[in-house]
Image: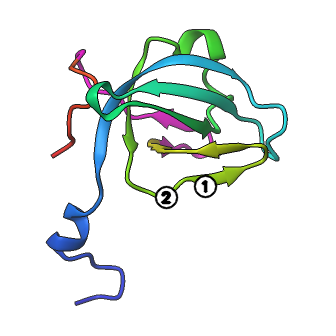
Amino acid sequence: MEENTLSWEDFAKVEMRIGTIIAAEVFSEARNPAYKITIDFGSFGIRKSSAQITKLYTSDEIVGKQVVAVVNFPPKQIANMMSECLVLGGLGSDKEVILIQPERMVENGTKIA
């Protein structure tokens, strides 16, 4: 097995869920331009995250969007807040982040499989 190859068991440990962004604001205390976002994961609760998505999105336009996030990382201190999940996105050629979203609305908390 190659060094960077994951086993199925490793991948199965990554808990990815779909949630809806319910609040977003500029995260002025962060080292890199980012938003503080609050995401509703349905029965998995409401979680906060820092997202460096300011190149392509305004804080107003992301509210109501559904996103994919890893929800089973331990909380991580980012500036003056605890990030409780990792929002996933593609990384463009200018290091801009393109959010990964479902192609239709689904129930908050839906598992990525």
Identity of the residue drawn at 68% across and 53% down = 77
Vertical placement of 63 versus 12: above or below?
Answer: above
Q: Secondary structure at mark 1?
A: strand
In the image, residue 60 lies in the stretch drawn in magenta? no
| Quadrant of res 2 | bottom left
Identity of the residue drawn at 31% across and 34% down = 44
Q: Which residue is mark 2?
A: 74
Residue 108 image position (x, y, % from top left)? 28, 24
Vertical placement of 15 versus 40: above or below?
Answer: below
Q: Main secondary structure of the magenta part?
A: loop
Q: Which quarter of the figure is the N terminus placed in? A: bottom left
**Snapshot colouring:** rainbow
Residue 104 image position (x, y, % from top left)? 22, 16
Q: Is 109 positioned to the left or the right of 35 in the image?
A: left
Q: Is 62 positioned to the left or the right of 10 in the image?
A: right
Q: Which mark is residue 76?
A: 1
Vertical placement of 112 versus 58: above or below?
Answer: below
Residue 10 image position (x, y, % from top left)? 24, 72
Residue 93 image position (x, y, % from top left)? 59, 46
The amino acid sitting under disc 1 is Lys
Identity of the residue drawn at 79% across and 42% down = 30
Identity of the residue drawn at 19% across and 62% down = 12
The amino acid sitting under disc 2 is Pro
Q: Residues within 10 Å of mark 1 (few under 14, many from 20)?
A: some
Q: Are marks 2 and 1 in contact (CB under 8 Å)?
A: yes
| Quadrant of res 56 | top right
- Report the span colored magenta: 90-105
- Measure how far apart labels 2 and 1 are at the Cα level: 6 Å
Q: Which mark is residue 96?
A: none
In the image, residue 98 lies in the stretch drawn in magenta? yes
